[in-house]
Image: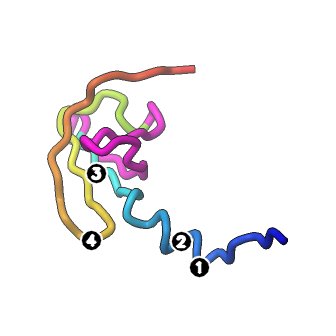
Amino acid sequence: MYSEPKPTEIYKKYLPAIVTIFAEKTGNKKSLGSGFFISDDGKIITCAHVLENVTKVTVQTSDKTYLIKNIIGENKI
């Protein structure tokens, strides 16, 4: 018999993959967004508007580690 997982179980399972994105944009503007790891080598996916006109990206992981990341591509749909 299948039972749906509880929200707390889902949260605990996927929390390590979720990140907070701090983006510095041209003109001294800043934006805040979220994303999640999609690969073991550290690639992260987020919405394109979070990274639009960005000059620097800092990512905070769920364990409060800060990482400087590079944008490697985008797909505006």
Q: Amino acid at mark 4?
A: Asp
Q: Nearer the viewer, residue 26 or 77?
A: 77
Disc ID at residue 8: 1
Q: Amino acid at mark 2?
A: Tyr
Q: Residue at x 65, y 75 (%)?
A: 7
Query: What whole-number distance in Å separates the C-alpha atoms at marks 4 and 2?
Result: 14 Å
Residue beneath label 3, please?
22
> Which of the image's four quarters has the C terminus?
top right
SS for callout 3: strand
Q: Are marks 3 and 1 in contact (CB under 8 Å)?
A: no
- Which residues are drawn in magenta? 25-49
Name the spot of residue 74 as percent of width and height, x first.
40, 23
Q: Are marks 3 and 4 in contact (CB under 8 Å)?
A: no
* Comes first in the chain, label 3 or label 4: 3
Q: Is residue 14 left or right of residue 24?
A: right
SS for callout 4: loop
Q: Amino acid at mark 1?
A: Thr
Disc ID at residue 11: 2
SS for callout 1: helix
Q: Residue at x 19, y 41 (%)?
A: 69
Q: Are marks 1 and 2 in contact (CB under 8 Å)?
A: yes
**How many numbered badges does the structure rendering display?**
4
Disc ID at residue 63: 4
* Comes first in the chain, label 4 or label 1: 1
Query: What whole-number distance in Å separates the C-alpha atoms at marks 3 and 4?
Result: 16 Å
